[in-house]
Image (cartoon, helix red, strand yellow):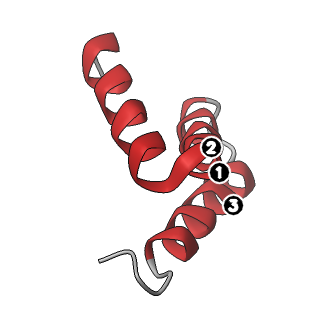
């Protein structure tokens, strides 16, 4: 992933879900990068929970 795309994605997630979303995205990306399924899974679950919050749509 190019650095520009990563930066734009991170800014969008932080704008939409706040700091918790940014940290979850960081966990997800780091988990994929180091091939750690636990880290990636936790990041994905937190992002999913943030996306399912009532009133976010």
Mark whose residue sits in front, 3 or 1: 1
CB atoms at circles 2 and 1 under 8 Å apart? yes
Mark whose residue sits in front, 2 or 3: 2
Instruction: Tell me the quadrant of the picture where the N terminus can be found.
Output: top left
**Residue with the most extreme front position:** 55
Instruction: Say which element carries label 2.
Output: helix
Residue 42 circle label = 3
The foreground one among 49 and 3 is 49
The foreground one among 12 and 35 is 12
Q: Earlier in the sequence, mark 2 or mark 3?
A: 2
Residue 20 circle label = 1
**Mark 3, residues whose alpha carbon is within 10 Å: few (<14), some, or many (≥20)?**
some
How far separated are the C-alphas under marks 2 and 1?
4 Å
Percent from the top left, x then y, of residue 24? 61, 49
Q: Is residue 32 above or below residue 11?
A: below
CB atoms at circles 2 and 3 under 8 Å apart? no
Q: Does the image show residue 41? A: yes
Percent from the top left, x then y, of residue 50? 54, 69
Residue at image coords 53%, 62%: 47
Instruction: Say which element carries label 1.
Output: helix
Residue at image coords 49%, 55%: 17
Residue at image coords 53%, 37%: 29
**Mark 2, residues whose alpha carbon is within 10 Å: few (<14), some, or many (≥20)?**
few
The foreground one among 54 and 32 is 54
How far separated are the C-alphas under marks 2 and 3?
15 Å
The residue where tag 2 is placed is 19
Percent from the top left, x then y, of residue 11? 39, 32
């Amino acid at each position: 992933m190019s650095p520009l795309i990563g930066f734009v994605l991170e800014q969008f997630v932080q704008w939409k879900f706040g700091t918790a979303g940014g940290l979850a995205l960081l966990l997800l990306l780091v988990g994929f990068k180091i091939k750690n399924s636990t880290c990636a899974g936790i990041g994905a679950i937190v992002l999913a929970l943030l996306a399912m919050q009532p009133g976010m749509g």
